[in-house]
Amino acid sequence: MRCLKTFFAFLFVIVFFVSCASQSAEVIPDYSGEFEQNTFDGLELTFAMSPYICYEQDSLFGDIAKARVAEIEEKYDVKIIFDENESLVSNLFYSISSGIKPCDVMLSTSFELYSQMRADLLFPVDNMPTPLVYSNTEKWGGREKLITYAYDNHLYGILPMYWPETIWKQVDHFFFVNENIISNLGQTDPREFVENGEWTRAKYEEVLNSYTHTNMSGETVYALAVEPAHYFSIAIKTSGIDYVVEKEDGTYANAFLEPGVVDKLTWVSDTFWNNWEVNITRGSDTFSTIAKFVNEESVMVLTHLYYGLEDIQYEVENFGILPFPLSDDLHGTGWIGQFEFYNNGISFPTNIEAIDEIAVVVNDIFEPLPGYETEEQRFEYYDRYVFHDSRDTKVIFECLENCRYLPYNDNGYLIPNAINNAKGGKSISQILEANAEIMQTTIEEVYIPLEETCDLLWGSN
């Protein structure tokens, strides 16, 4: 057995150096299947997740995921033990500080790991050996998605991009449109505007006016129901405004001080407040706002994709999904989405021991699932079982491809909330001036170091 282990240690060294040479040529090799069966001698690995990984028990993908785990166990002679203790992540500090290894692999949201990353409780994914290569963007997600797992020159999580139903739910915010009401009003299906290039901000303002009407009971049906902070945050992102901008010399600066930003933010504020309680309404919270749409008190609702699908798809007979229109200077480029965190991120406690074996097992588990190996196959599933219209699928995944990070824990809602609190009573210049100090401090202490970490991990934008 000692000889066998020596042989595989030698084999790993060869694979490592081949990997380095391949990466220098910007080619990410597929290491799946490089190791023969019976290589890990019954090694036990604890996964802090359910046996169905990212899915519900007795679901289509849950069954496939469970079969994949059994296949990997046999292939590598490894025993995967599942720990479904929901408090494991929150108790990570107490476990590790007590010298306990809580698990080998864990599945969690990046939101849950915010404090753990800053407390040095996670093993850097960028230090994982091959075959687990975080820079394989297609498999694990790239800079724009994994930025939520980046901190202090390291990366602490990856996303199973090949697995259906795992990532897209966290991309925000979309208009859900009641197509039956649109038809009854004699209006064009607005998805046609998206398809033919007419979905501009001017067109959006038109439909705000044309969709508001009085129903058979004499009640006002508003064009749009929305939570203001959600509206302002996605309107800012789709204006091409981030928190920092990279200058020609490679340094970063406050993006809110760039030319043209005040004009864009003025449109964001004015369009909302000029339509407030005329064409736009809201509930008392996210869910009651969605309920206004479900109860046909509004023609559209702008909300989280996940909550929208959860509360709308079984309640509204015929709905469509639209992106937020881009600012005029971006029109014709890809639709933009935003996200605050991602579920189903794969991370590792800092005190893991079988690092080489973990890298091999995790890399192989999250290869594409059988029957869903290609993007085309995965899209066919979404068209048939989730969105029911290929136009909606296309919009959502284009927004996923062009998603922008909104750092919820680090004053990401500072400006959206400030515009909301002003209620249209202050100019954008006044709002920016009033929040300049806290915004600049956050930019210097959080956003610029975050971008510099991403530059180190993926190279400059």
Image: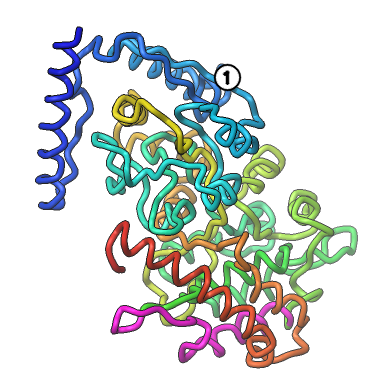
Q: Is residue 166 above or below residue 213?
A: above
Where's residue 200, x and y in %?
Answer: 50, 75
Q: Residue at x 37, y 70 (%)?
A: 333
Q: Nearer the viewer, residue 402 or 115?
A: 115
> Horizontal and vertical percent for residue 63?
47, 17
- The answer to whether residue 200 of the structure is visible from this angle is no
For image coordinates 53% across by 83% down, the residue present is 256
Asked if residue 390 lies in the magenta stretch, the reply is: no
In this rendering, position of residue 383 left or right of residue 11: right
Above-or-below relation of 238 to 55: below
Question: On screen, 165 above or below 443?
Answer: above
The colour scheme used to paint the residues is rainbow
Q: Is 398 or 43 nearer to us in this picture?
A: 43
Assign the C terminus to one quadrant of the image: bottom left
Q: At 68% from the left edge and 37% from the top edge, which residue is drawn?
A: 314
Q: Is residue 270 above or below residue 204?
A: below
Residue extent of the magenta highlight: 247-273
Residue 397 horizontal/vertical position (percent): 43, 51
Q: Locate residue 449: give its quadrant.
A: bottom left
- Please, what is the three-letter code of the amino acid marked with disc 1? Gln
Q: Give the side of residue 5 with respect to residue 385, left or right.
A: left
- As for residue 256 lying within the magenta part, the answer is yes
Q: Position of residue 363 (x, y in %)?
A: 32, 31
Inspect this view and state whether residue 260 appears: yes
Residue that carries the numbered disc 1 in the rendered image: 57
